[in-house]
Image: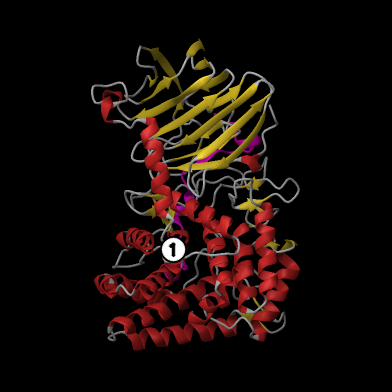
Protein backbone atom coordinates (compact mmCIF):
# COMPACT_ATOMS: atom_id res chain seq x y z
CA UNK A 1 0.00 0.00 0.00
CA UNK A 2 1.38 3.45 -0.89
CA UNK A 3 2.06 5.91 1.89
CA UNK A 4 -0.92 8.20 2.46
CA UNK A 5 -0.42 11.68 1.09
CA UNK A 6 -2.90 14.48 1.75
CA UNK A 7 -2.47 15.58 -1.85
CA UNK A 8 -4.76 12.68 -2.79
CA UNK A 9 -7.62 13.74 -0.49
CA UNK A 10 -11.09 13.83 -2.10
CA UNK A 11 -14.33 15.56 -1.11
CA UNK A 12 -17.81 14.06 -1.54
CA UNK A 13 -21.10 15.85 -0.87
CA UNK A 14 -24.83 15.51 -1.35
CA UNK A 15 -25.85 18.94 -0.05
CA UNK A 16 -26.77 17.55 3.39
CA UNK A 17 -23.45 16.23 4.57
CA UNK A 18 -20.04 15.40 3.18
CA UNK A 19 -17.22 12.91 3.31
CA UNK A 20 -13.46 13.21 3.03
CA UNK A 21 -11.71 10.25 1.46
CA UNK A 22 -8.07 9.29 1.05
CA UNK A 23 -6.72 6.21 -0.74
CA UNK A 24 -10.00 4.30 -0.56
CA UNK A 25 -10.65 5.17 3.09
CA UNK A 26 -13.50 7.44 4.12
CA UNK A 27 -12.05 9.26 7.11
CA UNK A 28 -14.69 11.93 7.77
CA UNK A 29 -18.48 11.65 7.61
CA UNK A 30 -20.62 13.88 9.86
CA UNK A 31 -24.16 12.56 10.36
CA UNK A 32 -26.81 13.59 9.63
CA UNK A 33 -25.55 16.97 8.38
CA UNK A 34 -22.33 18.94 7.78
CA UNK A 35 -21.99 20.21 11.35
CA UNK A 36 -23.00 17.00 13.15
CA UNK A 37 -20.63 14.70 15.02
CA UNK A 38 -18.70 12.55 12.57
CA UNK A 39 -19.07 8.77 12.68
CA UNK A 40 -15.83 8.41 10.71
CA UNK A 41 -13.19 10.72 12.17
CA UNK A 42 -9.92 8.97 11.33
CA UNK A 43 -8.66 12.18 9.76
CA UNK A 44 -8.36 13.41 13.37
CA UNK A 45 -7.30 10.12 14.98
CA UNK A 46 -6.69 6.94 12.99
CA UNK A 47 -7.00 4.72 16.08
CA UNK A 48 -10.08 6.16 17.79
CA UNK A 49 -11.79 8.11 15.03
CA UNK A 50 -13.32 5.39 12.86
CA UNK A 51 -13.18 4.88 9.08
CA UNK A 52 -14.63 2.94 6.13
CA UNK A 53 -11.86 1.54 3.96
CA UNK A 54 -11.63 -0.70 0.91
CA UNK A 55 -8.36 -2.18 -0.29
CA UNK A 56 -7.15 -5.29 -2.18
CA UNK A 57 -5.54 -8.10 -0.20
CA UNK A 58 -2.40 -7.90 -2.32
CA UNK A 59 -0.03 -4.99 -2.91
CA UNK A 60 -1.47 -2.41 -5.26
CA UNK A 61 -1.13 0.86 -7.04
CA UNK A 62 -4.02 3.30 -6.76
CA UNK A 63 -5.36 5.99 -9.08
CA UNK A 64 -8.35 8.12 -8.06
CA UNK A 65 -10.27 10.75 -9.97
CA UNK A 66 -13.68 12.37 -10.10
CA UNK A 67 -16.14 11.26 -12.75
CA UNK A 68 -16.49 14.34 -14.94
CA UNK A 69 -17.26 17.52 -13.03
CA UNK A 70 -19.42 15.98 -10.33
CA UNK A 71 -19.00 14.77 -6.75
CA UNK A 72 -18.49 11.08 -7.56
CA UNK A 73 -15.06 9.50 -7.10
CA UNK A 74 -13.65 6.50 -8.93
CA UNK A 75 -10.78 4.55 -7.33
CA UNK A 76 -8.85 2.04 -9.45
CA UNK A 77 -6.59 -0.38 -7.55
CA UNK A 78 -4.15 -2.30 -9.77
CA UNK A 79 -2.57 -5.51 -8.46
CA UNK A 80 -0.46 -8.15 -10.18
CA UNK A 81 -3.46 -10.48 -10.34
CA UNK A 82 -6.13 -8.03 -11.40
CA UNK A 83 -7.98 -4.81 -10.92
CA UNK A 84 -10.46 -3.44 -8.36
CA UNK A 85 -12.63 -0.47 -9.32
CA UNK A 86 -14.68 1.31 -6.65
CA UNK A 87 -17.00 4.25 -7.32
CA UNK A 88 -17.95 6.28 -4.25
CA UNK A 89 -20.69 8.89 -3.82
CA UNK A 90 -23.23 10.24 -1.37
CA UNK A 91 -26.77 9.71 -2.70
CA UNK A 92 -29.10 12.68 -2.79
CA UNK A 93 -31.59 13.21 0.01
CA UNK A 94 -30.22 10.72 2.55
CA UNK A 95 -27.24 10.48 4.89
CA UNK A 96 -25.51 7.55 3.23
CA UNK A 97 -22.42 6.34 1.43
CA UNK A 98 -22.65 4.10 -1.62
CA UNK A 99 -19.58 2.25 -2.88
CA UNK A 100 -20.14 0.35 -6.14
CA UNK A 101 -17.41 -2.14 -7.01
CA UNK A 102 -16.19 -4.23 -9.92
CA UNK A 103 -13.31 -6.50 -9.00
CA UNK A 104 -11.13 -9.16 -10.56
CA UNK A 105 -9.54 -9.93 -7.18
CA UNK A 106 -10.76 -10.43 -3.61
CA UNK A 107 -10.53 -7.37 -1.39
CA UNK A 108 -10.94 -6.25 2.21
CA UNK A 109 -13.56 -3.81 3.47
CA UNK A 110 -13.26 -2.44 6.98
CA UNK A 111 -16.12 -0.47 8.53
CA UNK A 112 -15.43 1.08 11.94
CA UNK A 113 -18.09 3.67 12.80
CA UNK A 114 -17.93 5.42 16.14
CA UNK A 115 -20.22 8.04 17.64
CA UNK A 116 -19.67 11.52 19.11
CA UNK A 117 -16.33 11.88 17.31
CA UNK A 118 -15.00 8.61 18.70
CA UNK A 119 -16.20 9.01 22.27
CA UNK A 120 -18.62 6.07 21.91
CA UNK A 121 -17.82 2.78 20.20
CA UNK A 122 -20.55 0.95 18.31
CA UNK A 123 -22.27 -2.30 19.11
CA UNK A 124 -22.73 -4.66 16.16
CA UNK A 125 -25.64 -6.88 15.11
CA UNK A 126 -25.72 -9.13 12.07
CA UNK A 127 -28.87 -10.30 10.29
CA UNK A 128 -29.93 -11.64 6.91
CA UNK A 129 -30.38 -8.06 5.71
CA UNK A 130 -26.92 -6.87 6.71
CA UNK A 131 -24.91 -5.42 9.56
CA UNK A 132 -26.08 -2.79 12.04
CA UNK A 133 -23.70 -0.62 14.05
CA UNK A 134 -25.55 0.86 17.04
CA UNK A 135 -24.89 3.67 19.44
CA UNK A 136 -25.73 2.07 22.79
CA UNK A 137 -26.61 5.41 24.38
CA UNK A 138 -29.09 6.60 21.74
CA UNK A 139 -31.33 5.35 18.94
CA UNK A 140 -28.90 6.21 16.15
CA UNK A 141 -26.88 3.81 14.08
CA UNK A 142 -25.32 2.89 10.76
CA UNK A 143 -26.73 0.03 8.70
CA UNK A 144 -24.62 -1.68 6.07
CA UNK A 145 -26.04 -3.66 3.16
CA UNK A 146 -23.57 -5.60 1.00
CA UNK A 147 -24.46 -6.98 -2.42
CA UNK A 148 -21.81 -9.46 -3.47
CA UNK A 149 -20.05 -12.61 -2.36
CA UNK A 150 -18.56 -11.82 1.02
CA UNK A 151 -17.59 -13.33 4.36
CA UNK A 152 -17.22 -11.74 7.78
CA UNK A 153 -13.67 -11.96 9.11
CA UNK A 154 -14.39 -10.11 12.33
CA UNK A 155 -16.69 -7.38 13.61
CA UNK A 156 -16.64 -4.71 10.92
CA UNK A 157 -14.07 -6.56 8.80
CA UNK A 158 -15.14 -8.25 5.56
CA UNK A 159 -13.57 -10.21 2.73
CA UNK A 160 -15.34 -9.66 -0.57
CA UNK A 161 -14.66 -11.98 -3.47
CA UNK A 162 -14.14 -11.01 -7.11
CA UNK A 163 -17.27 -9.84 -8.89
CA UNK A 164 -19.62 -6.88 -9.00
CA UNK A 165 -21.76 -5.38 -6.27
CA UNK A 166 -22.02 -2.55 -3.79
CA UNK A 167 -21.76 -1.53 -0.17
CA UNK A 168 -24.59 0.75 1.00
CA UNK A 169 -24.09 2.37 4.42
CA UNK A 170 -27.06 4.39 5.70
CA UNK A 171 -27.04 6.47 8.87
CA UNK A 172 -30.30 6.83 10.81
CA UNK A 173 -30.91 9.10 13.76
CA UNK A 174 -33.46 6.50 14.84
CA UNK A 175 -32.98 2.94 13.56
CA UNK A 176 -36.73 2.48 13.78
CA UNK A 177 -36.81 4.24 10.40
CA UNK A 178 -33.59 2.78 9.04
CA UNK A 179 -32.53 0.72 6.07
CA UNK A 180 -33.61 -2.57 7.64
CA UNK A 181 -36.88 -1.24 9.09
CA UNK A 182 -40.39 -1.65 7.74
CA UNK A 183 -39.94 1.55 5.78
CA UNK A 184 -36.58 0.48 4.38
CA UNK A 185 -38.02 0.02 0.89
CA UNK A 186 -38.16 3.82 0.45
CA UNK A 187 -34.38 4.11 0.33
CA UNK A 188 -32.64 4.29 -3.04
CA UNK A 189 -31.43 1.43 -5.17
CA UNK A 190 -27.66 2.02 -5.44
CA UNK A 191 -27.48 1.44 -9.18
CA UNK A 192 -30.44 3.65 -9.99
CA UNK A 193 -29.32 6.43 -7.67
CA UNK A 194 -25.87 6.35 -9.28
CA UNK A 195 -27.43 7.41 -12.58
CA UNK A 196 -29.68 9.98 -10.91
CA UNK A 197 -26.84 11.48 -8.89
CA UNK A 198 -24.55 11.76 -11.90
CA UNK A 199 -27.31 13.47 -13.88
CA UNK A 200 -28.01 15.84 -11.01
CA UNK A 201 -24.44 17.08 -10.75
CA UNK A 202 -24.08 17.46 -14.51
CA UNK A 203 -27.24 19.56 -14.66
CA UNK A 204 -26.20 21.74 -11.71
CA UNK A 205 -23.20 23.04 -13.62
CA UNK A 206 -24.89 23.40 -16.99
CA UNK A 207 -25.99 27.01 -16.42
CA UNK A 208 -22.51 28.28 -15.57
CA UNK A 209 -20.93 30.72 -17.96
CA UNK A 210 -18.50 28.67 -20.09
CA UNK A 211 -14.77 29.35 -20.05
CA UNK A 212 -11.81 28.18 -22.12
CA UNK A 213 -8.68 28.79 -20.08
CA UNK A 214 -8.36 26.74 -16.87
CA UNK A 215 -11.66 25.01 -17.68
CA UNK A 216 -11.08 21.90 -15.53
CA UNK A 217 -10.17 23.91 -12.44
CA UNK A 218 -13.14 26.22 -13.01
CA UNK A 219 -15.71 23.42 -13.13
CA UNK A 220 -14.11 21.47 -10.29
CA UNK A 221 -14.27 24.58 -8.12
CA UNK A 222 -17.90 25.17 -9.09
CA UNK A 223 -18.74 21.61 -8.08
CA UNK A 224 -16.94 22.11 -4.76
CA UNK A 225 -18.79 25.38 -4.09
CA UNK A 226 -22.17 23.73 -4.75
CA UNK A 227 -21.09 20.81 -2.59
CA UNK A 228 -20.59 23.24 0.30
CA UNK A 229 -24.20 24.47 0.18
CA UNK A 230 -26.60 22.99 2.75
CA UNK A 231 -29.51 22.40 0.43
CA UNK A 232 -32.40 22.69 2.92
CA UNK A 233 -31.42 26.28 3.81
CA UNK A 234 -29.03 27.57 1.15
CA UNK A 235 -26.37 28.17 3.80
CA UNK A 236 -22.82 27.83 2.44
CA UNK A 237 -20.28 26.42 4.86
CA UNK A 238 -16.73 27.75 4.90
CA UNK A 239 -15.29 24.20 4.74
CA UNK A 240 -16.59 20.68 5.43
CA UNK A 241 -13.90 19.75 7.95
CA UNK A 242 -12.94 20.61 11.51
CA UNK A 243 -9.61 21.05 13.25
CA UNK A 244 -7.30 20.24 10.36
CA UNK A 245 -4.18 22.17 11.35
CA UNK A 246 -2.80 25.24 9.64
CA UNK A 247 0.60 24.11 10.97
CA UNK A 248 1.13 20.41 11.69
CA UNK A 249 1.80 19.72 15.35
CA UNK A 250 0.59 23.12 16.54
CA UNK A 251 -2.65 24.62 17.79
CA UNK A 252 -4.11 26.59 14.86
CA UNK A 253 -6.96 24.11 14.51
CA UNK A 254 -10.50 25.39 13.87
CA UNK A 255 -13.98 24.16 12.99
CA UNK A 256 -15.20 25.74 9.73
CA UNK A 257 -18.48 23.84 9.21
CA UNK A 258 -20.60 26.97 9.58
CA UNK A 259 -21.95 29.71 7.35
CA UNK A 260 -19.60 32.69 7.56
CA UNK A 261 -21.45 35.75 6.26
CA UNK A 262 -18.32 36.95 4.47
CA UNK A 263 -17.50 33.67 2.74
CA UNK A 264 -21.10 32.94 1.78
CA UNK A 265 -21.58 36.46 0.42
CA UNK A 266 -18.43 36.13 -1.70
CA UNK A 267 -19.82 32.85 -3.00
CA UNK A 268 -23.17 34.45 -3.86
CA UNK A 269 -21.38 37.25 -5.71
CA UNK A 270 -19.27 34.83 -7.70
CA UNK A 271 -22.21 32.57 -8.54
CA UNK A 272 -24.01 35.65 -9.83
CA UNK A 273 -21.02 36.64 -11.95
CA UNK A 274 -20.88 33.21 -13.60
CA UNK A 275 -24.66 33.29 -14.12
CA UNK A 276 -25.60 30.55 -11.66
CA UNK A 277 -28.30 32.88 -10.46
CA UNK A 278 -30.69 30.52 -8.69
CA UNK A 279 -27.87 29.26 -6.45
CA UNK A 280 -26.71 32.81 -5.77
CA UNK A 281 -30.21 33.80 -4.77
CA UNK A 282 -30.48 30.86 -2.37
CA UNK A 283 -27.21 31.80 -0.67
CA UNK A 284 -28.33 35.41 -0.33
CA UNK A 285 -31.74 34.42 1.00
CA UNK A 286 -30.11 32.47 3.81
CA UNK A 287 -28.07 35.52 4.78
CA UNK A 288 -31.11 37.79 4.62
CA UNK A 289 -32.97 35.41 6.92
CA UNK A 290 -30.50 36.07 9.77
CA UNK A 291 -30.35 39.88 9.43
CA UNK A 292 -31.31 41.83 12.55
CA UNK A 293 -32.93 45.13 11.45
CA UNK A 294 -32.84 46.64 14.93
CA UNK A 295 -29.11 46.94 15.66
CA UNK A 296 -26.08 45.31 14.03
CA UNK A 297 -27.35 43.74 10.83
CA UNK A 298 -25.40 40.52 11.30
CA UNK A 299 -25.20 39.97 15.05
CA UNK A 300 -22.53 37.32 14.49
CA UNK A 301 -19.92 36.71 11.79
CA UNK A 302 -21.26 33.21 11.16
CA UNK A 303 -24.25 30.98 11.86
CA UNK A 304 -25.17 27.34 12.00
CA UNK A 305 -26.37 25.89 8.71
CA UNK A 306 -30.00 26.31 9.80
CA UNK A 307 -29.44 29.94 10.84
CA UNK A 308 -29.27 29.33 14.57
CA UNK A 309 -26.33 29.68 16.95
CA UNK A 310 -23.72 26.91 16.61
CA UNK A 311 -22.56 24.85 19.53
CA UNK A 312 -19.99 26.53 21.80
CA UNK A 313 -16.35 25.83 21.03
CA UNK A 314 -15.01 22.82 22.91
CA UNK A 315 -11.99 20.55 22.86
CA UNK A 316 -12.18 16.84 22.06
CA UNK A 317 -9.40 15.84 24.40
CA UNK A 318 -9.62 12.11 23.60
CA UNK A 319 -8.52 12.61 19.97
CA UNK A 320 -4.82 12.99 19.19
CA UNK A 321 -5.50 15.34 16.28
CA UNK A 322 -4.44 15.25 12.65
CA UNK A 323 -0.82 14.12 12.69
CA UNK A 324 -0.72 14.86 16.40
CA UNK A 325 -2.01 18.43 16.10
CA UNK A 326 -3.84 19.40 19.27
CA UNK A 327 -6.20 20.65 20.50
CA UNK A 328 -9.01 19.17 18.41
CA UNK A 329 -11.72 21.82 18.42
CA UNK A 330 -15.37 21.71 17.40
CA UNK A 331 -17.53 24.80 17.49
CA UNK A 332 -15.84 28.15 17.02
CA UNK A 333 -15.44 30.94 19.53
CA UNK A 334 -15.32 33.52 16.72
CA UNK A 335 -19.13 33.44 16.90
CA UNK A 336 -18.85 36.08 19.62
CA UNK A 337 -16.78 38.48 17.52
CA UNK A 338 -17.94 41.82 16.19
CA UNK A 339 -16.65 41.92 12.62
CA UNK A 340 -17.81 45.03 10.80
CA UNK A 341 -16.65 44.09 7.31
CA UNK A 342 -19.32 41.42 6.79
CA UNK A 343 -22.13 43.84 5.94
CA UNK A 344 -20.07 45.13 3.01
CA UNK A 345 -19.44 41.61 1.76
CA UNK A 346 -23.16 40.91 1.82
CA UNK A 347 -24.08 44.17 0.06
CA UNK A 348 -21.54 43.51 -2.68
CA UNK A 349 -23.07 40.07 -3.21
CA UNK A 350 -26.59 41.46 -3.21
CA UNK A 351 -25.67 44.15 -5.72
CA UNK A 352 -23.97 41.66 -8.03
CA UNK A 353 -27.03 39.42 -8.02
CA UNK A 354 -29.41 42.28 -8.84
CA UNK A 355 -27.17 43.56 -11.64
CA UNK A 356 -26.68 40.13 -13.25
CA UNK A 357 -30.26 38.90 -12.83
CA UNK A 358 -32.25 42.11 -13.19
CA UNK A 359 -34.42 40.73 -10.40
CA UNK A 360 -35.78 44.05 -9.17
CA UNK A 361 -38.70 42.40 -7.38
CA UNK A 362 -36.22 40.54 -5.16
CA UNK A 363 -34.44 43.83 -4.46
CA UNK A 364 -37.69 45.56 -3.57
CA UNK A 365 -38.90 42.73 -1.34
CA UNK A 366 -35.61 42.82 0.55
CA UNK A 367 -35.10 46.56 0.60
CA UNK A 368 -35.66 46.43 4.33
CA UNK A 369 -32.43 44.43 4.64
CA UNK A 370 -30.51 46.95 2.55
CA UNK A 371 -31.88 49.79 4.69
CA UNK A 372 -30.97 47.98 7.91
CA UNK A 373 -27.38 47.43 6.78
CA UNK A 374 -26.95 50.98 5.51
CA UNK A 375 -28.41 52.41 8.73
CA UNK A 376 -26.12 50.30 10.91
CA UNK A 377 -23.06 51.12 8.81
CA UNK A 378 -23.82 54.84 8.87
CA UNK A 379 -24.04 54.78 12.65
CA UNK A 380 -21.18 52.39 13.43
CA UNK A 381 -18.37 52.89 10.93
CA UNK A 382 -16.24 54.85 13.38
CA UNK A 383 -16.06 51.86 15.76
CA UNK A 384 -13.11 49.51 16.05
CA UNK A 385 -13.74 45.85 15.27
CA UNK A 386 -12.05 42.48 14.86
CA UNK A 387 -10.62 41.90 11.38
CA UNK A 388 -11.61 39.37 8.75
CA UNK A 389 -8.66 37.24 9.92
CA UNK A 390 -10.35 36.87 13.32
CA UNK A 391 -7.45 37.59 15.65
CA UNK A 392 -9.14 36.97 18.97
CA UNK A 393 -9.61 39.94 21.30
CA UNK A 394 -7.73 42.27 18.92
CA UNK A 395 -9.80 45.26 17.77
CA UNK A 396 -8.52 48.07 15.59
CA UNK A 397 -9.55 50.47 12.85
CA UNK A 398 -8.63 47.95 10.15
CA UNK A 399 -8.34 49.49 6.70
CA UNK A 400 -9.94 46.46 5.04
CA UNK A 401 -12.93 46.73 7.38
CA UNK A 402 -13.30 50.46 6.69
CA UNK A 403 -13.21 49.81 2.96
CA UNK A 404 -15.92 47.16 3.30
CA UNK A 405 -18.04 49.64 5.26
CA UNK A 406 -17.62 52.03 2.33
CA UNK A 407 -18.66 49.15 0.03
CA UNK A 408 -21.81 48.56 2.10
CA UNK A 409 -22.99 52.14 1.60
CA UNK A 410 -21.79 52.45 -1.99
CA UNK A 411 -23.74 49.33 -3.03
CA UNK A 412 -26.78 50.31 -0.98
CA UNK A 413 -26.95 53.59 -2.89
CA UNK A 414 -26.61 51.78 -6.22
CA UNK A 415 -29.36 49.31 -5.35
CA UNK A 416 -31.61 52.15 -4.21
CA UNK A 417 -31.15 54.03 -7.47
CA UNK A 418 -31.80 50.84 -9.43
CA UNK A 419 -35.23 50.34 -7.87
CA UNK A 420 -36.19 53.95 -7.34
CA UNK A 421 -35.80 54.06 -3.56
CA UNK A 422 -34.23 57.49 -3.05
CA UNK A 423 -35.32 58.46 0.46
CA UNK A 424 -32.07 57.85 2.36
CA UNK A 425 -29.53 57.88 -0.43
CA UNK A 426 -28.11 61.35 0.19
CA UNK A 427 -27.26 60.48 3.80
CA UNK A 428 -25.66 57.18 2.82
CA UNK A 429 -23.69 58.87 0.06
CA UNK A 430 -22.42 61.47 2.49
CA UNK A 431 -21.34 58.80 4.98
CA UNK A 432 -19.55 56.88 2.22
CA UNK A 433 -17.66 60.03 1.27
CA UNK A 434 -16.64 60.52 4.90
CA UNK A 435 -15.43 56.93 5.22
CA UNK A 436 -13.34 57.18 2.08
CA UNK A 437 -11.83 60.49 3.15
CA UNK A 438 -10.84 59.06 6.52
CA UNK A 439 -9.29 55.95 4.96
CA UNK A 440 -7.22 58.06 2.58
CA UNK A 441 -6.02 60.19 5.50
CA UNK A 442 -5.63 57.68 8.36
CA UNK A 443 -5.18 54.41 6.48
CA UNK A 444 -2.36 55.52 4.20
CA UNK A 445 1.16 56.20 5.41
CA UNK A 446 3.09 58.80 3.42
CA UNK A 447 6.23 57.75 5.24
CA UNK A 448 5.82 54.10 4.19
CA UNK A 449 4.20 55.01 0.89
CA UNK A 450 1.41 52.44 1.30
CA UNK A 451 -1.93 51.70 2.84
CA UNK A 452 -1.53 49.99 6.20
CA UNK A 453 -3.07 47.14 8.13
CA UNK A 454 -4.90 49.50 10.48
CA UNK A 455 -4.77 53.18 11.35
CA UNK A 456 -1.36 54.05 12.77
CA UNK A 457 0.19 50.70 11.88
CA UNK A 458 3.47 50.36 10.02
CA UNK A 459 2.49 46.92 8.64
CA UNK A 460 0.76 45.93 5.43
CA UNK A 461 -1.89 43.25 5.31
CA UNK A 462 -2.73 41.16 2.23
CA UNK A 463 -6.42 42.05 2.63
CA UNK A 464 -5.48 45.43 1.12
CA UNK A 465 -5.42 43.66 -2.25
CA UNK A 466 -9.21 44.01 -2.38
CA UNK A 467 -9.15 47.82 -2.62
CA UNK A 468 -9.27 47.88 -6.44
CA UNK A 469 -11.39 44.71 -6.62
CA UNK A 470 -14.28 46.61 -5.01
CA UNK A 471 -13.66 49.81 -6.95
CA UNK A 472 -12.44 51.76 -3.93
CA UNK A 473 -9.33 52.84 -5.80
CA UNK A 474 -8.02 52.24 -9.29
CA UNK A 475 -5.44 49.46 -9.49
CA UNK A 476 -3.14 51.82 -11.42
CA UNK A 477 -3.31 54.57 -8.82
CA UNK A 478 0.22 55.23 -7.47
CA UNK A 479 -1.05 54.88 -3.90
CA UNK A 480 -2.21 51.35 -4.59
CA UNK A 481 0.73 50.38 -6.81
CA UNK A 482 3.17 51.23 -4.02
CA UNK A 483 1.00 49.23 -1.60
CA UNK A 484 1.03 46.26 -3.98
CA UNK A 485 4.78 46.46 -4.26
CA UNK A 486 5.15 46.45 -0.49
CA UNK A 487 2.71 43.52 -0.08
CA UNK A 488 4.66 41.41 -2.58
CA UNK A 489 7.99 42.39 -1.06
CA UNK A 490 7.07 41.61 2.55
CA UNK A 491 4.37 38.91 2.34
CA UNK A 492 5.28 36.82 -0.73
CA UNK A 493 6.78 33.45 0.21
CA UNK A 494 6.87 32.05 -3.32
CA UNK A 495 5.92 33.30 -6.76
CA UNK A 496 2.26 34.37 -6.49
CA UNK A 497 1.82 32.92 -2.99
CA UNK A 498 1.35 35.19 0.01
CA UNK A 499 0.94 34.99 3.76
CA UNK A 500 -1.78 37.24 5.21
CA UNK A 501 0.59 39.07 7.58
CA UNK A 502 3.83 38.27 9.32
CA UNK A 503 2.45 37.31 12.75
CA UNK A 504 -0.67 37.41 14.89
CA UNK A 505 -1.93 36.68 18.40
CA UNK A 506 -0.77 33.05 18.07
CA UNK A 507 2.70 33.82 16.79
CA UNK A 508 4.48 33.64 13.46
CA UNK A 509 2.57 32.73 10.29
CA UNK A 510 4.19 29.91 8.35
CA UNK A 511 2.13 28.98 5.30
CA UNK A 512 0.62 30.98 2.43
CA UNK A 513 -3.12 31.64 2.42
CA UNK A 514 -4.56 30.36 -0.85
CA UNK A 515 -7.31 32.95 -1.33
CA UNK A 516 -4.70 35.68 -1.62
CA UNK A 517 -3.31 34.26 -4.86
CA UNK A 518 -6.70 34.64 -6.49
CA UNK A 519 -6.95 38.26 -5.30
CA UNK A 520 -3.45 38.91 -6.59
CA UNK A 521 -4.31 37.45 -10.00
CA UNK A 522 -7.39 39.66 -10.21
CA UNK A 523 -5.32 42.72 -9.34
CA UNK A 524 -2.95 41.97 -12.22
CA UNK A 525 -5.90 41.55 -14.57
CA UNK A 526 -6.91 45.10 -13.64
CA UNK A 527 -3.37 46.20 -14.37
CA UNK A 528 -3.69 44.63 -17.83
CA UNK A 529 -1.02 42.02 -17.14
CA UNK A 530 -2.87 38.91 -18.26
CA UNK A 531 0.30 36.80 -18.50
CA UNK A 532 1.15 37.54 -14.87
CA UNK A 533 -2.40 36.66 -13.77
CA UNK A 534 -2.20 33.35 -15.63
CA UNK A 535 1.14 32.58 -14.00
CA UNK A 536 -0.30 33.16 -10.54
CA UNK A 537 -3.32 30.92 -11.23
CA UNK A 538 -1.00 28.25 -12.62
CA UNK A 539 1.11 28.44 -9.49
CA UNK A 540 -1.91 28.06 -7.21
CA UNK A 541 -3.12 25.05 -9.18
CA UNK A 542 0.34 23.50 -8.95
CA UNK A 543 -0.12 23.57 -5.18
CA UNK A 544 -3.72 22.33 -5.24
CA UNK A 545 -4.08 18.64 -4.54
CA UNK A 546 -4.41 15.84 -7.10
CA UNK A 547 -8.18 16.32 -7.20
CA UNK A 548 -7.91 20.11 -7.66
CA UNK A 549 -9.06 20.73 -4.11
CA UNK A 550 -7.66 23.79 -2.39
CA UNK A 551 -7.24 24.05 1.36
CA UNK A 552 -6.95 27.21 3.41
CA UNK A 553 -3.14 27.03 3.39
CA UNK A 554 -0.34 25.25 1.52
CA UNK A 555 2.82 23.64 2.85
CA UNK A 556 5.36 24.69 0.24
CA UNK A 557 7.85 21.97 1.15
CA UNK A 558 5.52 18.99 0.86
CA UNK A 559 2.88 20.59 -1.42
CA UNK A 560 0.29 19.19 0.96
CA UNK A 561 -2.83 21.12 1.94
CA UNK A 562 -2.92 22.68 5.38
CA UNK A 563 -5.95 23.82 7.32
CA UNK A 564 -9.48 22.82 6.45
CA UNK A 565 -10.17 21.43 2.99
CA UNK A 566 -11.73 22.25 0.61
CA UNK A 567 -12.14 25.92 1.50
CA UNK A 568 -15.04 27.92 0.07
CA UNK A 569 -13.03 31.17 0.15
CA UNK A 570 -10.26 29.80 -2.06
CA UNK A 571 -12.48 28.03 -4.60
CA UNK A 572 -14.75 31.05 -4.96
CA UNK A 573 -11.70 33.25 -5.48
CA UNK A 574 -10.35 30.90 -8.14
CA UNK A 575 -13.68 30.83 -10.01
CA UNK A 576 -13.80 34.64 -9.99
CA UNK A 577 -10.24 34.96 -11.25
CA UNK A 578 -10.76 32.42 -14.04
CA UNK A 579 -14.05 34.03 -15.03
CA UNK A 580 -12.43 37.47 -15.33
CA UNK A 581 -9.40 36.06 -17.12
CA UNK A 582 -11.60 34.47 -19.78
CA UNK A 583 -13.45 37.71 -20.45
CA UNK A 584 -11.48 40.85 -19.51
CA UNK A 585 -14.47 42.98 -20.59
CA UNK A 586 -16.10 41.93 -17.33
CA UNK A 587 -13.69 44.27 -15.55
CA UNK A 588 -15.14 47.21 -17.43
CA UNK A 589 -18.63 46.42 -16.12
CA UNK A 590 -17.68 46.77 -12.45
Measured from the top left, where is residue 456 in percent x and y?
A: 63, 76
Disc 1 secondary structure class:
helix
Q: Is residue 82 left or right of residue 218?
A: right
The correct choice, above or below, for 532 with respect to 444 in the image is above
- Residue 259 in view, yes or no: yes
Q: Which residue is mark 1?
A: 271
The correct choice, above or below, for 270 with respect to 567 in the image is below
Extent of the magenta region: 318-344
- Residue 499 in view, yes or no: no
The correct choice, above or below, for 50 with respect to 198 in the image is above
Q: Is residue 73 left or right of residue 182?
A: right
Measured from the top left, where is residue 433 in percent x and y?
A: 46, 87
Q: Is residue 39 left or right of residue 508?
A: left
Measured from the top left, where is residue 253 in percent x and y?
A: 58, 45
How many marks the image carries: the answer is 1
Residue 320 picture quarter: top right
Measured from the top left, where is residue 40 in percent x and y?
A: 49, 30
Asked whether 320 falls inside the magenta stretch, the response is: yes
Amino acid sequence: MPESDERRRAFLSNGFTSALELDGSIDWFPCPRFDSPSIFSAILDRTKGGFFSIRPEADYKLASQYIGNNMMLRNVFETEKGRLEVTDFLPLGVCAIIRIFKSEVPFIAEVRPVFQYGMTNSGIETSEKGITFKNGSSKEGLELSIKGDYSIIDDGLFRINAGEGYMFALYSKDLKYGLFSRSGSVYPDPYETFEATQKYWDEQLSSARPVGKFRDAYYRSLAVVLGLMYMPSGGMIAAPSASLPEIVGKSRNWDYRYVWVRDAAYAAETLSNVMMLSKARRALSFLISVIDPSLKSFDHPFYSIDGTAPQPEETLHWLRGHRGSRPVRIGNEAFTHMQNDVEGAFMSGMHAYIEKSGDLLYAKENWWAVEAIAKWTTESWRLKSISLWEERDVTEHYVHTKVMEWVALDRAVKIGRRIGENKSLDGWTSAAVDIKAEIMKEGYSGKLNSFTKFYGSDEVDASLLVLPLYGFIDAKDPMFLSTLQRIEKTLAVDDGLLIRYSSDFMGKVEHPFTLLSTWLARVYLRLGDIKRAETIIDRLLYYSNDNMLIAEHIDLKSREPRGNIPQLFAHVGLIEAINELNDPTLLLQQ
